[in-house]
Image (cartoon, rainbow, N blue to C red):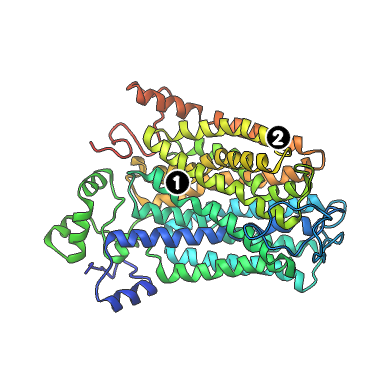
Amino acid sequence: MPVNDGNTMRGYPPGVLVIRNYRGKDWSIKTYRYVVLLVTFVAYTAYHASRKPSSIVKSVLDPDPMCEMTALYPWPVGEIFSKRGSLGEGLNVYKDKGWAPFDGKQGTSKLGEIDVAFLACYSMGMYVAGHLGDTLDLRLFLTAGMIGSGVFVGLFGMGYFWNIHVFWFFLVMQMIAGLFQATGWPSVVAVIGNWFGKTRRGLIMGVWNAHTSVGNISGSLLAAGVLEYGWGWSFIAPGVFIFVGGIIVYLFLPAYPEDVGFPFLNGSVENDIRISSDEEALIQNAATGTKEANSIPRSGSVGRSSVHLIEACAIPGVIPFALCLFFSKLVAYTFLYWLPFYLSQTAIGGEYMSVRSAGNLSTLFDVGGIVGGILAGYISDKLKARATTAATFMYAAIPAMILYRKYGNISQTINIVLMIIAGLFVNGPYALITTAVSADLGTHSSVMGNSRALATVTAIIDGTGSLGAALGPLLTGFLSTKGWNFVFGMLSLGALIAGLLLSRLVIAEYAERKNKPAVFGQHSPGADVNQPLLGEQK
């Protein structure tokens, strides 16, 4: 059985311990990795699902005068497109009413302020959460964040049942929820980085990162599915989902390999290369307590120290990718928060959709995002060029968004196809930077592969990106009142700037591929002159 050191190791999660005692033997390293992938996937699916309700209920809180709610089943059970006023007997409980204080002339702007309050607290909390994640037990930290998120997302929905019409109540609930939500991303990326080396990291994390789109889709369907019972349920249901997810994390997530008796898989560069050369054999020896296991480094998770924010910012590539993500998330989160509202206000093939249908249709954008994340990860692994892949996707997103705006209203089929293509190019670089790039930089040779830098580096990159995520929906709240062409112009400009910010790293990657000195002294993330490229051996 794996050997524990009580002074440096936190031990088994309760649920894993029960299963281990019942089976009479421990899991293999491969099984643990599958469990880690599954639990973190469910965890961040719940995080994103709990962020979708506000986009679904926007048209209920601040309805268009012509809008009607219907009692039809949501997609994929029922129809995606539905004409306003021609749907038969509906449950028109919200028709022309709205919900104060969001139903006045400034209702759209107030909804934008709610979004920016959430995202501003989320981005600011990210920097603190990243350092805490590198200092505290990731399993307990993630559990607390998920349970807290569930509570305050649910409290926002309780405003419906308590008949609250005071703006500050909804604002405060979103702000506190944003702080709790900040615990999620640095924690799950750090856990994945603890368990997986750099080989095929782009592809693995590209597939794993589908949780973002799966969360958006499930959150949209869940919120839309209960909307007819009152908009409060659209918040309570996802709140319960993430609350339960927090309990699952507490019971079953082994955050560190060494805490369940396996070696530190992401140690120094030399150790990483040595272990990866015969990883499975060495780890299985560790599990059975053979002599070969003694040669494997076994520092416990408690004994490792974290890095400071300034040290993490000094890692080559952190700042350029963080700034790129600022504009990338500005684009992605504008779609996340405003696409259902846009669809409900736009005639497609001469027909308008109900609020529920618009929410369900918007999930197809995330279907494209799943494909984009996997494709970006696979391409970046093959080319060993994260920056080049991300920049190319951002440039391709510009014509994709322009085409969607110009031709998406022609017919239902064209709208769906162009929406999926836009989702592919918009979410592809966003997924790549927040997963594989963050993990590469968090285990960069300049920090000696200390995975205690993972959450901090992830927090810097995603925290900066989240500032853009807050700005995009805020600007959209104002620009949409002047016309949606202004909104799509802003999104195209953001995508262009995101690509340009990676120019130096793109040139550096091109120079490496040509076996020339990098022009600006930069190297692709996670690599340096003394370290093999991802997926290669020295």
- Spot occupied by residue 38 in the image (x, y as percentages of width and height): 42, 60
Q: Is residue 186 left or right of residue 57?
A: left
Q: How far apart are marks 1 and 2 (CA)?
A: 30 Å
Residue type for callout 2: Tyr
Image mark for residue 206: 1
- Spot occupied by residue 114 in the image (x, y as percentages of width and height): 72, 55
- Spot occupied by residue 340 in the image (x, y as percentages of width and height): 70, 50
Position of residue 98 relative to residue 425, above or below, is below
Would you name the residue on which mark 2 appears? 407
Residue type for callout 1: Gly
Residue drawn at x 63%, y 60% as measured from the top left: 77
Residue drawn at x 67%, y 32% as measured from the top left: 402
Name the residue nearer the viewer: 506 or 61.
61
- Spot occupied by residue 454 in the image (x, y as percentages of width and height): 42, 50
Q: Is residue 82 left or right of residue 258?
A: right
Name the residue nearer the viewer: 348 or 201.
348
Residue drawn at x 30%, y 31% as measured from the top left: 529
Q: In which quarter of the image is residue 395?
A: top right
Q: Earlier in the sequence, mark 1 or mark 2?
A: 1
